[in-house]
Amino acid sequence: MLRGMKQMSRSALDEEIPTDRHACRRALIALKAGYPPRDALRYLSVGMTGVLAEIDNVLVQAGRGARVRPLVVSGDYGEGKSHTLRLIATEAERQHFAWVVVTHDRQQNIGLHKPAWLFQHILWQLRWSYPALDLRRWDSWLHGQPDYRTDRSMRRQLRGCLAELTQSLRSQGFRGFVLCLDELENVALLAGNQRAIFGEVLRHLLDGPESHVVLVLAATSGLSAAGRWGTLLRPPALDERSALILTYRIQRLHSAAFDWRPPIGPVPIFEKAWKASSAVPSGRWRTFVQSVVIHLEVLEQNGWLPTEHVSRPALRAESAPDVLSRITRFARLLGIR
């Protein structure tokens, strides 16, 4: 049984573990803050094989010039939506697509209800992310604020402008363009005619996808209409097996980051984090991950075990059957017999 666990750790558990200590530290800092890390992202994408396959398929098709349906990322806060968006961006970069993530913000006039402002923000994002890009064709867009007449005309012209922008990107070495529009559930905050404009612009984008363009629309699961916009991607729900594997991987990241190994295995850390995540009504993935990272920090800072295990008599009190029970449960969760 122990040999099987060792074999599992060499394949699924340790797959693609980063070797750069600084990258591991950056990943842990992001996880503790509740953000998807730029580093070690695939390594931490436990249970997302199907999502990755769909993302890869869409990018390959778009790179060949096919007109692909939008990807729709739906999930509640703290349940993997931002992680999935980051995964799409990482895969887009790996396959040589330019990419931009724009968050719908009514107060900043950024969103489908303000298409000219949205396009201007996309150009700003590209200039920031890719300083060497030649964007002289859109110099007039990069300065000043769009007027009402321009914004009105862009309700129908946004799709064409994105197609023209994508052609320019391809002429400069990219395979295409990935545009992620996040937090579209904020359409509920729009007032008056703005909701109708939002719907009009969205319909024009959905009616005829352009070649080499991948549109990604993200919203919380409360926006029921989102499922009809394109190919639905739902982050996997938190389950014990995935959570245990993720605990192991985070523990490995921590060891690589600080050249330190905790005196206990992943099971008790998993159990503590699982209990914490089970006590919250939403955001279970985020709560679980943060709990694992914080628990490892406490272990390292104390130099031994958390408070409830500090007593050496209590440590010796754990019987052999208890230890065997934990190992058996660990193996069962990983599918080892």
Image (tube, grey):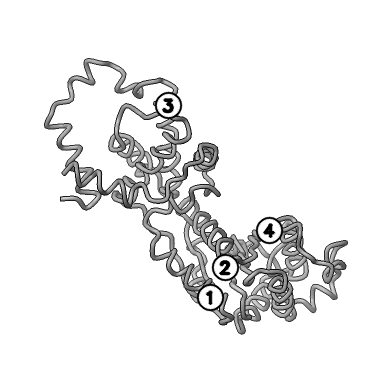
Q: Position of residue 2 (x, y in %)?
A: 19, 41
Q: SS of the residue at dot 1?
A: loop
Q: Which of pointers 4 and 1 lies earlier in the amino acid sequence?
A: 4
Q: CA distance from mark 1 to mark 3?
A: 45 Å
The extreme left residue here reads 321
Contact between labelled residues 1 and 2, with CB atoms less than 8 Å apart: yes
Foreground: disc 3 or disc 2: 3
**Which mark is on residue 105?**
4
Q: SS of the residue at dot 4?
A: loop
Residue assigned mark 2: 217
- The three-letter amino acid code for the residue at tag 4 is Asp
Q: Which of pointers 4 and 2 lies earlier in the amino acid sequence?
A: 4
Contact between labelled residues 3 and 1, with CB atoms less than 8 Å apart: no
- For residue 116, which quarter of the picture? bottom right
- For residue 280, which quarter of the picture? top left
Foreground: disc 1 or disc 3: 3
Does 99 sit left or right of 45 as displayed? right
Q: CA distance from mark 2 to mark 1?
A: 8 Å
Residue assigned mark 1: 229
Q: Position of residue 143 (x, y in %)?
A: 87, 62
Looking at the image, which residue is at 29% across and 22% down?
309
Q: SS of the residue at dot 2?
A: strand
Looking at the image, which residue is at 41% across and 20% down?
302
- The three-letter amino acid code for the residue at tag 2 is Leu
Q: CA distance from mark 4 to mark 3?
A: 38 Å
Residue assigned mark 3: 298
Foreground: disc 4 or disc 2: 2
Looking at the image, which residue is at 74% across and 62% down?
121
